[in-house]
């Protein structure tokens, strides 16, 4: 894969809103390289469902293999396949459909939101089932009124912190309705007591409009951070930090500008799928927020707006290719935003995760059938 690194032009912080926020923007050039991960013969990295964890100073990558119904483990330090754990598809210790997965406490946790069930698969091969059917929250929300809104490509998947699982939830109504966005979007589950604890957070105000919604961008993104959980949204420049008890800590601005067009959305009576797709092209938005433990930083992918057509009136064939990589570090109290411009037309951004002093992003096409190809982005 050929990749061209682009150095951003100096960014002018002219928005009055941004001046009030007192954020310094630093445009940085990106250093990149290639990384090959040797696959087993049954290897399959086409799924959004993956997790990473560090053990004995070695970073491991785990992916859900749909073809073999198994968890496939890889040693990222060696770039090699390690081993596989098969998962039953039915029965009390089985799942037929995997909607999300995460790592926590020497286990990989698999989720099936429709079945309201999860499996805790230990690294030693042990299996334990978690039942979400009777989950009660302190705020009195009925478990039958909840919808587990998993969309791993947007970062709408569970995260783990200090024995607690945090996951995206919504009201079990049509996502075009205003009611979908009116309840706290984060649920907290205590894995030791096998019970729900609380729900917290709030949808960003752009989602609470009476006359507009954002189609497939109506998701949340969950990530851990050094002291708790970070909540963000595809159509908002803001990232909100909570502690492990769901208490508000601070609101961060992780975006390169103010986006007035974000407040428009689509008509709630809109039934034109093409309009939803076009919205994702012509407006800026954010794919997901990630926490980088080694840098103690939050990272976001910001989509740059692109015209549907070229100047000559023909369709723009390089849609979804231009992105910014934003890095906000705790050591600066999140007051400095490092901005990298990346050409992502050959990258599969949903499969991306922290690695050493940067991140790995899956390439769309593997150069060799038995190796998964990644691009490594180094952050200075």
Image: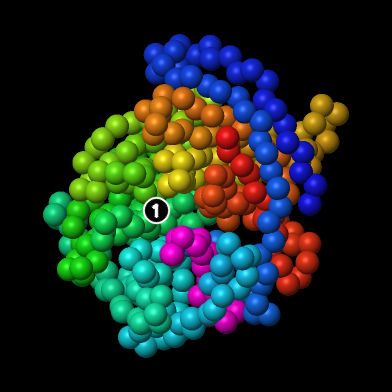
245 left or right of 342?
Answer: left
Residue 162, percent across and down? 26, 56
Identify the residue shown where x is 76% and y is 33%.
309
Q: Residue furthest bottom?
A: 91
Q: Say which quarter of the image contains residue 367.
A: bottom right
The answer to whether 145 is drawn above or below residue 232 in the figure is below
Q: How many marks?
A: 1
Query: Would you say residue 70 sits in the magenta stretch?
Result: yes
Residue 293, percent across and down? 43, 47
Q: Nearer the viewer, residue 277 or 70?
A: 70
Asked whether residue 214 is in view, the answer is no
287 left or right of 346?
Answer: left
Query: Would you say residue 282 sits in the magenta stretch?
Result: no
53 left or right of 324?
Answer: left
Identify the residue shown where x is 46% and y is 71%.
98
Identify the residue shown where x is 25% and y is 43%.
243
Q: Which residue is mark 1?
A: 174
Q: Residue furthest right?
A: 312
Q: Quadrant of the C terminus?
A: top right
Asked whether residue 296 is in view, the answer is yes
| Helix, strand or loop at mark 1 | loop
Q: What's the magenta region? A: 54-72
Most common SS among magenta residues = strand
Q: Nearer the viewer, residue 38 or 142?
A: 38
The answer to whether 309 is drawn above or below residue 143 in the figure is above
Residue 191, percent across and down? 24, 66
Q: Nearer the viewer, residue 194 or 137?
A: 194
Identify the residue shown where x is 22% and y is 62%.
190
| Residue count near mark 1 (Cα–Cα under 10 Å), binned few <14, some 14–19, many ≥20 | few
């Amino acid at each position: 894969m050929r990749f061209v690194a682009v150095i951003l032009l100096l960014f002018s912080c002219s928005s009055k809103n941004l001046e009030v926020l007192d954020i310094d923007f630093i445009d940085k050039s990106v250093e990149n390289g290639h990384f090959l991960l040797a696959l087993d013969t049954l290897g399959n990295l086409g799924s959004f469902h993956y997790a990473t964890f560090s053990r004995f100073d070695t970073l491991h990558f785990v992916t859900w293999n749909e073809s073999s119904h198994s968890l496939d483990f890889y040693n990222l330090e060696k770039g090699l396949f390690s081993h596989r754990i098969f998962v039953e598809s039915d029965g009390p210790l089985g799942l037929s459909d995997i909607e999300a997965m995460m790592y926590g406490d020497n286990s990989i946790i698999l989720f099936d939101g429709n079945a309201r069930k999860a499996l805790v698969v230990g690294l030693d091969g042990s299996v334990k089932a978690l039942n979400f059917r009777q989950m009660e929250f302190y705020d009195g929300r009925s478990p039958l009124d909840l919808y587990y809104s998993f969309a791993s490509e947007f970062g709408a998947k569970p995260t783990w912190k200090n024995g607690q699982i945090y996951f995206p939830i919504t009201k079990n109504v049509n996502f075009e309705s205003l009611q979908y966005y009116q309840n706290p979007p984060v649920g907290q589950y205590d894995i030791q007591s096998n019970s729900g604890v609380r729900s917290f957070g709030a949808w960003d105000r752009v989602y609470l409009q009476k006359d507009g919604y954002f189609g497939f961008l109506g998701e949340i993104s969950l990530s851990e951070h050094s002291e708790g959980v970070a909540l963000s949204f595809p159509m908002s420049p803001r990232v909100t930090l909570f502690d492990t008890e769901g208490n508000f800590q601070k609101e961060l601005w992780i975006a390169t500008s103010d986006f007035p067009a974000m407040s428009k959305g689509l008509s709630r009576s809109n039934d034109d799928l093409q309009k939803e797709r076009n919205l994702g092209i012509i407006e800026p938005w954010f794919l997901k927020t990630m926490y980088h433990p080694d840098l103690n930083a939050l990272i976001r992918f910001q989509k740059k707006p692109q015209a549907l057509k070229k100047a000559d009136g023909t369709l723009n064939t390089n849609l979804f290719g231009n992105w910014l990589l934003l890095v906000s570090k705790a050591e600066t109290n999140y007051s400095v935003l490092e901005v990298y411009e990346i050409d992502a037309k050959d990258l599969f951004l949903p499969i991306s995760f922290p690695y050493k002093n940067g991140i790995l992003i899956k390439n769309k096409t593997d150069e060799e059938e038995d190796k998964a190809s990644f691009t490594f982005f180094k952050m200075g």
